[in-house]
Image (tube, helix red, strand yellow):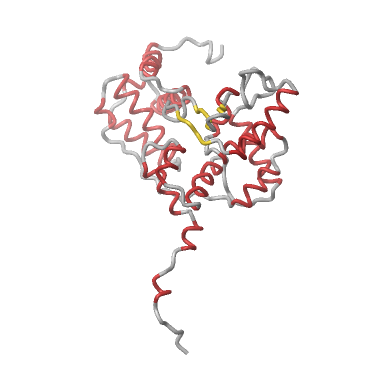
Amino acid sequence: MTESTRAISPLRQRMIDDMTLRKLGPRTQTAYIRAVKNFTRFFGQSPDAATAEDLRRYQLYLVQQNTSSTTLNATLTGLRFFFEITLDRPGVMKHTSHVHQPRKLPVILSVEEITQLLQAAGSLKYQAALGVSYGAGLRASEVVHLTVTDIDSKRRVIRVEQGKGKRDRYAMLSPALLELLRAWWREGTAQRKVLPGGWLFPGQDPVNHLSARQLNRAFHRALDAAEINKRVTLHGLRHAFATHLLEQREDIRVIQVLLGHQKLDNTARYTHVATKILHEVKGPLEYLDLKPTA
């Protein structure tokens, strides 16, 4: 019997119901359930019998196993939902605490590197998909879920439905990006890959959309083909979008809207990697009449 056909326990079903009531996404629900399953395996009995000391002991175990800060915090978030919401036992988590994560500056691809990357995409479909990620600043999940009708050529915008945080927004559609998308649409419809009103970037079966994993693989193939040695992820195209706009003196609040950030602080970090702006700043030493000592 597989896990998918095994009967779900009443406790897990209640947790699933609690997550559904709060409209948590499928990936979040899977992550929360995984956190509880892993704790149960460690605990050795039903998780509803756990005490605050058991949770503290589990966090100590994870730290000793060199669990990354990201995984550790995600695990605690899932467990906190289970104990505080599903079991209504908020006191159980009192001896646990999230781990501070140093915020690292993203690695930014230059305009020249972006050009090389897109030229090495391997197909017009992937060139267009990666072009949307950079040209409109969309996340990978947002790119692959685009439909043909999301492209509004008259208003020059891309409609992004249910992006991060379950929010709809409009992204920019520049003339160059529109031209690239039209080229792909013509090729895709001629080959019957792009269906009327269907996915803009279909998978092998046009009924299904391209997966984020497939797009990620295409990105890394292009990265290798372009011989770009920077350690950068697909999300780096979104970082480059924001940074390059900032270097063009675009208002940071406009960039915030285009990225779909709720907080300006999330957008402001790109000021730290906009090197073109740094190069244009005249340092205070330049104003001194200083000559090197002989």
Q: Residue reaching furthest right?
A: 191
Residue 221 in the image: state x and y as whole percent.
68, 41
The residue at the point 45 percent across, 87 percent down is 293
The residue at the point 40 percent across, 13 percent down is 13
The residue at the point 42 percent across, 47 percent down is 251
Q: Quadrant of the N terminus?
A: top right
Q: Quadrant of residue 199?
A: top right
Residue nearest the viewer, comparing 251 with 85: 251
Residue nearest the viewer, comparing 208 with 103: 208
Residue 71 in the image: state x and y as whole percent.
44, 37
Q: Residue reaching furthest bottom?
A: 294
Q: Quadrant of residue 288?
A: bottom left
Q: Quadrant of residue 66?
A: top left
Above or below: residue 128 compared with residue 208? below
Q: Residue reaching furthest left?
A: 91
Above or below: residue 272 compared with residue 242? below
Q: How many marks?
A: 0
Residue nearest the viewer, comparing 89 with 241: 241
Q: Is residue 200 left or right of residue 67?
A: right
Residue 217 in the image: state x and y as whole percent.
64, 36
Residue nearest the viewer, comparing 113 with 42: 113
Residue 114 in the image: state x and y as whole percent.
62, 47
Q: Is residue 158 left or right of residue 73?
A: right
